[in-house]
Image (cartoon, coloured by chain):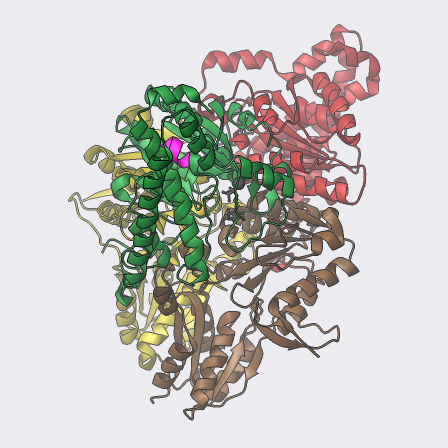
Chain colours: A green, B red, C brown, D yellow
Amino acid sequence: MAIAQLHDLSKVQLLEFYRQMRLIREFERECERQYTRGNIKGFLHVYTGEEAIAVGAISTLKPEDYVVTHYRDHGQALARGMDTNGVMAELFGKATGVSKGKGGSMHLFDAHKNFMGGYAIVGGQLPIAAGLALAAQYTEQERLALCFMGDGALNEGEFHESMNLAAVWHLPMIFFCENNLYGMGAPSADTLAVHQQMYLLAEAYSMANYRVDGNDVLAVHELMLEVTSDVRGGKGPAFIEARTYRIQGHSIADPANYRPEEEVEYWRTQDPIPRFRELLTGNGVASEEDFDQIDSAVDEEIVAAAAFAEASPFPEPEELMTHVYED
Amino acid sequence: MAIAQLHDLSKVQLLEFYRQMRLIREFERECERQYTRGNIKGFLHVYTGEEAIAVGAISTLKPEDYVVTHYRDHGQALARGMDTNGVMAELFGKATGVSKGKGGSMHLFDAHKNFMGGYAIVGGQLPIAAGLALAAQYTEQERLALCFMGDGALNEGEFHESMNLAAVWHLPMIFFCENNLYGMGAPSADTLAVHQQMYLLAEAYSMANYRVDGNDVLAVHELMLEVTSDVRGGKGPAFIEARTYRIQGHSIADPANYRPEEEVEYWRTQDPIPRFRELLTGNGVASEEDFDQIDSAVDEEIVAAAAFAEASPFPEPEELMTHVYED
Amino acid sequence: MAVITYREAVAQALRESLDEDPRVFLVGEDIGPYGGAFAVTKGFWDEYGKRRIKDSPLSESAIVGAGVGAAMAGLRPIVELMTINFSLLAMDQIVNHAAKIRYMSGGQFSVPLMIRTVTGAGASVAATHSQSFEGWFASVPGLMVVVPSSPRDVLGLFRSCRDLQDPVVFVEHILLYSTRGEVSDTNYKIPLGQAAVTREGADITLIGYSRMAQVCLTAAEELSGQGINAEVVDLRTLRPLDIDTVAESVKKTHRAIVVEETSKLGGFGGEIASQIQEEVFDYLDTPVRRIAGAEAPIPYAMPLEQIAIPSGSTVAALARQVMGR
Amino acid sequence: MAVITYREAVAQALRESLDEDPRVFLVGEDIGPYGGAFAVTKGFWDEYGKRRIKDSPLSESAIVGAGVGAAMAGLRPIVELMTINFSLLAMDQIVNHAAKIRYMSGGQFSVPLMIRTVTGAGASVAATHSQSFEGWFASVPGLMVVVPSSPRDVLGLFRSCRDLQDPVVFVEHILLYSTRGEVSDTNYKIPLGQAAVTREGADITLIGYSRMAQVCLTAAEELSGQGINAEVVDLRTLRPLDIDTVAESVKKTHRAIVVEETSKLGGFGGEIASQIQEEVFDYLDTPVRRIAGAEAPIPYAMPLEQIAIPSGSTVAALARQVMGR
Ligand SMILES: Cc1ncc(C[n+]2csc(CCOP(=O)(O)OP(=O)(O)O)c2C)c(N)n1
Ligand SMILES: Cc1ncc(C[n+]2csc(CCOP(=O)(O)OP(=O)(O)O)c2C)c(N)n1
Ligand SMILES: [Mg+2]
Ligand SMILES: [Mg+2]
């Protein structure tokens, strides 16, 4: 773990990292419960195990920066400070959802947070993120676009076109690959020629590139502090690979029994939340009481969110035809 | 110039290289004449200046190997030994054309020569070439697919997807980039991040890669002898960048005055045909008489081809509806 | 006779192809160990091995294009596009290449490629994952488009596709996979371009395909209870399109409703309605009517999605209106 | 009043946008020093510089997607897809993204992106370069599709597009660029969703858009010499579609022919014919007829290509047939 950071960060901030990771973890647990109860429908892809990435990375952004991500987007949305009630209600398809229940789990948006969307077409968010960075460049604003993607997205043509465009146009953006080793049931070893050396994919655009332990929230945060300042400083786009693991299956429908037991076991030991918790206790930064306080606050927030979502009304039938075009 | 080859190659073969390059050059000249006379319509993209690539590369293939290329395809077609009359007639849109006048200049095909097509969507031929290589692999035949593309094709998503697929599936194919420094009016410097180090694009798939002087027919031939034997030997796909120059504009409609005069001048001095001719005379391999004989034979072939095309009938109206599906 | 699911019918058709024709192999995303996003190829990987069941990278354009090339080389690849929504990423290979190579080569090459994909809304997966582009493919000369609505048709049509030398887009419906139906044990085939009258009736003709053909039957059931005897025509293939069977039916009933799942403006239903009035204008008592999806992206919220696409009751309601009841 | 070419009209519309709105910039392949594949942006690079005239890599999906993102950020990008044939490579960004973001975000974001592209056959550039996909775009809720047939309409419609907050596919025709027409010097606008009666007549209504609207006028000329007085309706936009103007015309003429360039089966013409009979069934003396491109890829050979698409004389011939002459 990146101890260095421990000293630069206040206890408040460190505990906030813990709180956010815990919030995401519990949010996803609740989603799985609600899915089995039939309150959440369609596809449900949880972020469980990858919390350190969204929390460590997004904590380095400014409010005006853009966040773009893929369909596994609950974690980034909550880390960006989107309203837990509104996100849960969106998953319930309720009128009080962040997108009025029209987008659902895979398509979260929040204009107030410059959360520019979760996108469900693998790779589809990359050109859009490039466009947001282009807008920042064109208007000469010091804003950047942080674009998350899965390792599977690296197979898509849109990845190549977006990386090349960002490099050629020197766009202020960060391509952040959440490498959880699988795209659905396919190990990246079977689908990506350089799955062990993803940095080569960035070298192909002579783009700055980095690799980090995606289960170490401080390491991710530390790296992103450096990269964001480079990008703001006009050094052009950057690519980051964060190694992590999808503790659950691809979606709630996937038992994921195509994965070797040892692998699953190993990664359980790498769970970012216990790791971080032990670090803080081990270094005397925080006590069990601190964590208990946070945990119960999080639990309350989740219970409240589920209650809010359940109590909220479905959209009125008229909503079917609103927002197709400017109303 | 790659003198080494001089010794391994018979005079007959060396002169055959010259003949083919000369044939392509004169064929294109005739096309330009016929275009201004209105006998050839639509787009006309000539291969003038790039002859050493098609001739040097295709001369290393076996009849059963597959050739796939882009819309600037006259050179590869003639180098593959396609009938000059049939190709010219195709450009005239005549019933005697290799594709009955239905495909035209950008879409040449010849089943007998395993010339699997010229493709007019930039990058579109790459996945198809991968499929041909896949077929060879699946049927355990020792055949390879040679796929030509322009430097502009490297910008397209289909390039990335095809390179990755070929690498992951270990396909017996060669990606051959004719880097003539421009895609239409755009210098690759403005469109491709690694235009000076294209090999990095192959490294991104840990694919074997090579660079060669595309205006040196012997160098291209020599390299392709090595690469084809590697690919046949099961070493997987390879990427080759051949530097060359488009002496004419992108198409006959393009005066190409966006190119610096010095650049154009420099490349005139690199014209592959005089270079090769001087090499052969300089080394006493061939005499002016040899060349004159070939030149006049080529001129006759071209005159005959134009006459054949002109004299040939247009397709019958019924041909409009044939070959849409299996007839 | 056996009763199997639509999913089992597709799996059986694929097994027959793999067993009977060594030129056949499958390519697709997660069709291997994962067993396919809709569990169609469950077990195939173990049975047939990775040579014939090719798990691919997430590269829609490359895998379809690879299928085109392999087909040109004489093989019979079957490429799965996980859903039709992702076919937009392979449009170039399907439309600019697969559909045109025979023609542009003057008949020198054929592309016996089968593309299997999944269409439809109603699964609560929102706008990007609930589309129906089969009508677009049906507008492309050089392609064939098959849209089965039952296990029986899946098997019969798939077998006919195997005899073709041209590219086929075989469109399965996400909500039909678990539906059951009888299939004969014989090795029967159903030719492309032959619509089916799946219910006889004298009063009005309901025309649909894929899941909407089933919705038409549901509507007909409801109508029968109200003294309206509806005939149902299941198109089964969009290209070739069998307008004769439709026309014959309308000659008898004098009224027609075209049902489709995608939004109305520019939908394939316009083609059908247009051809009906061109063919049997003088037999029509009322204009050909259409019912289709809403002019909106598909919303996630279930109550909205349910009213966004035609149902048995909305079709029946329109039928009553047409009948003046 | 000035007489300018269709190409000049597009260039003028672009210049107005660049001059009047700092949020506007152009992105496209070879729109810079090369001046555009069809010379529309000739000189722009020198006039406006590379900040606002962005020459792009050959990456159709990335440049359209970048336009989507920039539009979400409040800019007004105008992305050029060199021809509509290449739009197949950008289909995902146009259909899955540009068209749906407003809806999926519950109205939080809008995508005021303009995509300019070039449609049409007749230029002897064969199957992959002679297609017309505007009908596909017109079937996508969330998009607007503009198909001008004259310099006047190019200017008037383009100006209206600039006021929109939604994605527009602005479709220019390859064979119209050099055609000339009068345009007023005023800053007039033509609203989307308003078809034009470009020729009055009482006997039959000919309906077309883009180049086929001109072909309809040619046919009407020929017919007038034969005592048939044809009315011509130019749709001008496909989405929104102004069926009322068409219906009004047919109420008067009682006969209609829909003309389109792309192949007939599944073409947008079916939508128009279908809506006509739904709207004014009782006014029709004969079925609505359609004339369209051949059910084949476009061939290179000119004599074949010429018979592959409708011409003034083939349209006139069908009109005579409909009139029973
Ligand atoms: C273009 C496209 N192809 C296929 C899919 C189906 N699909 C949804 S998620 C997914 C796996 C993506 O894996 P990865 O990018 O690694 O993200 P992860 O699920 O591991 O977070 C696939 C194949 C899709 N949504 N879009
Ligand atoms: C997908 C696509 N985009 C754009 C075009 C238009 N176009 C035709 S050739 C060409 C330039 C290609 O350059 P390159 O690949 O370097 O080949 P070269 O002409 O230099 O031989 C372009 C942009 C096309 N045919 N296909
Ligand atoms: Mg992954
Ligand atoms: Mg080039």
Q: Is residue A58 magenta?
A: yes
Q: Position of residue D152 (x, y in %)?
A: 25, 48
Q: Total number of numbered labels?
A: 0
Horizontal side of C201 relative to A96 (left or right) equals right
**Residue most extreme to the left:** D186
Query: Quadrant of the rendered structure where residue D229 is?
Result: bottom left
Q: A290 or A131: nearer the eye?
A: A290
Q: Position of residue D178 (x, y in %)?
A: 36, 42
Stretch in magenta = A53-59
Q: A187 or D183: nearer the eye?
A: A187
Q: Position of residue C190 (x, y in %)?
A: 66, 73
Q: Is residue C73 magenta?
A: no
Can the viewer see residue B38 in this picture? no
Q: Position of residue D57 (x, y in %)?
A: 45, 31
Name above or below for residue D110 compared with residue C276. Answer: above
Q: Residue at x 52, y 52 (%)?
A: C87
Horizontal side of B11 relative to B326 (left or right) equals right
Q: Residue at x 50, y 64 (%)?
A: D265
Q: Magenta-highlighted stretch: main secondary structure?
A: helix
Q: Which quarter of the rendering shows the C terminus of chain A?
A: bottom left
Q: B266 or A116: nearer the eye?
A: A116
Name above or below for residue C211 compared with residue B302. Answer: below
Q: Quadrant of ligand 4?
A: top right
Can the viewer see residue D219 in this picture? yes
Horizontal side of B286 relative to D53 (left or right) equals right
